[in-house]
Amino acid sequence: MPPSGTPVKELILQDIETTLAAITAGSAYYTSVAVVDRINTIPVEIRDYPAIVLTPLGTDYDQPGDARTTAIGANYRVRATLVARTRTDAAATIENFIRDVHKALLVDITRGGEAINTRMLSDSVFYPTQIEEPVAIADCIIEVRYRTLRTDLNTAT
């Protein structure tokens, strides 16, 4: 029988996915996100723009304490690849998209109560020239600080 509950990292990823999917142009955002997907296959096929592809990168765990330590802290990193289709103003379009993602992530830095903090570590922008689609791409690295029980990785503390 599998453990009960859902791993905290999965809950955090679900929250990021839901948060980014809700970005809609208006008074708070420049961009309306068409689709947010997790990396499932290579290559990723994008049909709707603007799109965000989430890729879990890894986790750095705190050094363990002694036997009395009841919690484990960690930093979970996720790449959000933003893809915007544009024939003009590629730099402004992708920079506004990055800003919108950053702003959306800061609305609830606790990821629905599962995390301690969320922050954008970096972004890198690319303007591919060897593909047919006129797109601008940005890789944004997100870091989420969280803590779980030492004996139950499905329970945030």
Image (cartoon, rainbow, N blue to C red):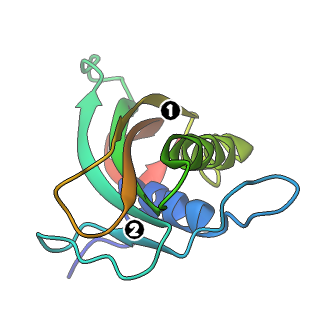
Res 46 → quadrant: bottom left
* Observer-nearest of 1 and 91: 91
Marks 1, 2: nearer the viewer: 1
Q: Is residue 2 left or right of residue 113?
A: left
Mark 1 residue element: strand
Query: Where residue 103 appears, x then y in whole percent?
Result: 68, 42
Amino acid at pointer 2: Thr
Q: Position of residue 124 (x, y in %)?
A: 36, 33
Q: Which residue is more in the foreground, 111 or 18?
A: 18
Location of mark 2 (residue)? 6
Provide residue 23's location: percent of width, then percent of height.
67, 63
Q: Position of residue 88 (x, y in %)?
A: 53, 55
Question: Secondary structure beneath disc 2?
Answer: loop
Residue occupying the far left of the picture: 42
Quadrant in which residue 74 is drawn: top left
Q: Is residue 17 above or below residue 67?
A: below
At a point 40% along the width and 52% down the height, the residue shown is: 136
Q: Residues within 10 Å of mark 1 (few under 14, many from 20)?
A: some
What's the distance in space between the residues labelled 1 and 2, CA to CA? 25 Å
Please tell me which residue is depicted at 26% across the width and 37% down the height of the picture: 59
Q: Which mark is residue 120?
A: 1
Q: Amino acid at mark 1?
A: Met
Mark found first going from the N terminus, 1 or 2: 2
